[in-house]
Image: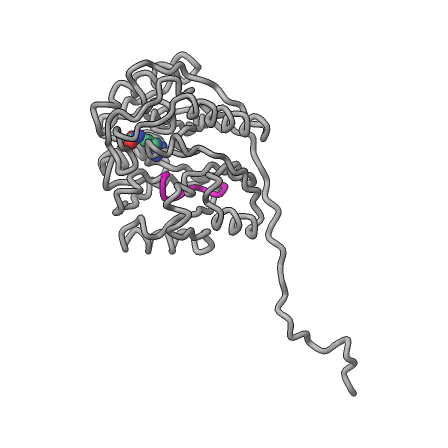
Amino acid sequence: MTVSPAMEPTARPVRTAPPVRTALKRRYLMCRPEHFAVTYAINPWMDPETGADAALAVEQWEALRAAYITLGHEVSLIDPIEGLPDMVFAANGALVVGGRVYGARFAYPERAAEALAYVEWLRSNGFAEVLEGLHTNEGEGDFLTLGHIILAGTGFRTDLAAHQEAQEFLGRPVVTLRLVDPRFYHLDTALFPLGDDNVAYYPGAFSPGSRAVLERLFPHAVIAGERDAAVLGLNAVCDGRNVVINAEATGLIETLRRHGYDPVPVDLSELRKAGGGPKCCTLELRFPG
Ligand code: ARG
């Protein structure tokens, strides 16, 4: 019996469409950069000689806030405090998981007072279970929460002992990752969660052992190149489908699109002069359940 042409196996590779991604509504805490300035240097991005344009920073930050609201997320605001120019980077203020607040303890004295301001805001907004960290930790700058685990950075800011402290308090497995490139001094400058069980990251920011851990945990991760990392493209915020990301990270934006995500480019060039991007400006408030 001869095989009819229609039944011949096709030589063309089957192109599967990327999965449909689902956005989940988020609650974010942000701080308007009214007192933003670059007056000290605690990371390689900061140069007090160059400074930064506070008015432009506010304008760009307002566009970020508007983007979240357009996507359907809820944004709460904490009052900025004069003399705390980095307070706009709300991610560093705490880690909030399952309604429990693990409070920050900053590595540099310039930012130390922010910790209490964030903890007080959270306490007076319904979060009763608060642990003020005994060990140095910079909140969501170094702790990124996925469905079942929390990834935690160390090497520049957050102490290893804080990883243990967070795990014990939050009851979630905390996986330590070692950062080795001073440009990527917080975990959230080198990696971001894509929903509950995948991530995007720049391998060059991590020690060989931590790279191996990431490969083992996330075989389908989105890998970013140095050019996209160098514009803080990994400092992005994903709601499961939409990815709010620095507009200059053009390569990563294309890759994310191919994986079925909807990039939402924003321009935060002024805040980058302090070493921050969209994620740094955003603390996620995760309620119980
Ligand atoms: N100038 C700030 C610092 O060095 C920037 C913090 C950025 N925040 C972040 N989550 N990566 O502490």
What residue is drawn where x is 32% and y is 14%? Answer: 82
What residue is drawn where x is 39% and y is 41%? Answer: 232
Is residue 138 among the parts visible in the rendering? no
Residue furthest out toward the left:
109
Residue 74 rendering spot, x and y as whole percentages? 53, 23
Q: How is the image coloured?
A: one colour
Number of labels in the image equals 0
In the rendered view of the protein, which quadrant contains the N terminus? bottom right
Is residue 2 among the parts visible in the rendering? yes
User: Which is more toward the observer, 222 or 66?
Assistant: 66
> 94 above or below 142?
above
What residue is drawn where x is 51% and y is 27%? Answer: 63
Taking the image in four quarters, ligand 1 sits in the one at top left
Tell me the quarter of the picture where residue 48 sits.
top left
Residue 163 rendering spot, x and y as whole percentages? 28, 36
Tell me the quarter of the picture where residue 242 sits.
top right
Residue 209 rendering spot, x and y as whole percentages? 27, 54
Residue 220 placement, left or right of 242: left
Residue 144 rendering spot, x and y as whole percentages? 38, 37
Residue furthest out toward the top:
124
Q: Which residues are magenta?
A: 188-195
Residue furthest out toward the bottom:
1
Q: Magenta segment: does it hold 206?
A: no
What residue is drawn where x is 51% and y is 51%? Answer: 255
